[in-house]
Amino acid sequence: MEVDLVLRNVSVARHPGLVDIAIRDGLIAEIGNRISCEAVEEEDLEGAFAFPGFAESHIHLDKACIMERCSICAGTLEEAVRETAKAKAGFSEDDVYMRASMLVEKAIMHGTNRMRTFVEIDPRAGLRSFEAIKRVRDNYAFAIDIQICAFAQEGLTQEPETEAMLDEALHSGADLIGGCPYTDVDSAEHVRRIFALARKHDVDIDFHLDFNLDPAKTDLPAVIEATCANGYAGRVTIGHVTNLSMLDPDTLAVVGRKIADAGIALTVLPATDLFLMGRQSNFSIPRGIAPANALSALGVRTAIATNNVLNPFTPFGDASLARMANLYANVMQLSRDEDIALVFDMVSAQASEIMGLRHDLAVGGPADIVALDAADPCEVVRASAPALAGWKRGLKTFSRPRPQLLKAKTTPSLSAISG
């Protein structure tokens, strides 16, 4: 057999021991032990864990890396929305392109090769950010697949021109539509109009929803009702839903089953939710993270994602989903291997499924592969394992070799050091 590339000595899920992966014409030709073939190129990955790559299901590229343009005093959601609204009025297309490109490059080198980004479209941002992110999507297609969600961050009914702008974006390259009922003066009408636009363009929906800690303050029932009424099961995702973290187990089970029965997926954003929630408390501060693992057990499709990086919503971050998975597992006090493995799925296979994308390493499938410095998915999450290299359709897209410790030729004894 003649192939273009063989990756030797990799650890792959559902394959015992170390295996090789042979690649031809951008597709996986064979996975097996000690593959014998004629290869143009071979690479020994020395036991690294290989998988189809991380899937970033919720990120905001357009407003990333703007800390120097904003003030953070109260650290609340309201302040973050207000400060970002002021800053984005000054965004230029080239400015958004530059900041978004830098973050996409970081994501790629952390092992992410599929992404859903929200782009704010309204009278302040216009379509400038949208045009910039379309350029990013095109220019980095060699390494990552990017979905663009046309997003109404600051409401819809109080700014009628936003609806027409969203419609235009969906006509000219946006992949889906996103709503934010809690910022609208009429949240129910907001939900209705978002569904109407989605049906008009036959696209999926991704809502920012119930970003508070009051279970009684919720737009979830309206979204569930609209999902069922519009026949949109499997096509709606909700992000944040932090008030679910305040429910007792029995009530959570009831609500979780309603979400699952409606076919709605859930994305949790640990870094942002931890930073913004619980600001009213001086002690015993609630975590404010929806329990994705418990909801997954109830049948809800769940994912973990980055959300914001270096802005008033999240003044931290580097677009590493391994780090985000580790943060979630730590905060949710998970330890069992099966729970940790589920967390890994929520930044890979389950996140890809929510985005409607394929996620497997299989003969005949695309050679989209990322190698991580770990033996298995559990080690990836527990140790925030770094990415080593990635390939898209069999072509190498990045390389981050393992660091090497340069030991001195002679090492002083402990007695010499202490004496």
Image: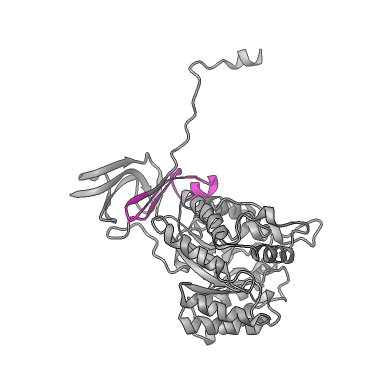
Q: Nearer the viewer, residue 381 or 202?
A: 202
Instruction: Report whether residue 393 is seen.
Output: yes
197 relative to 74, above or below: below
At horizontal 74% and vertical 56% (from top left) the residue drawn is 72
Q: Nearer the viewer, residue 178 or 414?
A: 178
Q: Any magenta on residue 74?
A: no
Quadrant of the rendered structure where residue 221 is? Answer: bottom right
276 relative to 187, above or below: above
**Coloured how?**
one colour
At horizontal 59% and vertical 61% (from top left) the residue drawn is 307
The magenta span reads 367-396
Q: Is residue 257 left or right of residue 72?
A: left
250 relative to 161, above or below: above
Q: At which x and y percent is residue 284?
A: 77, 57
At horizontal 53% and vertical 53% (from top left) the residue drawn is 103
Q: Nearer the viewer, residue 34 or 333?
A: 34
Quadrant of the rendered structure where residue 63 is? Answer: bottom right
102 relative to 155, above or below: above
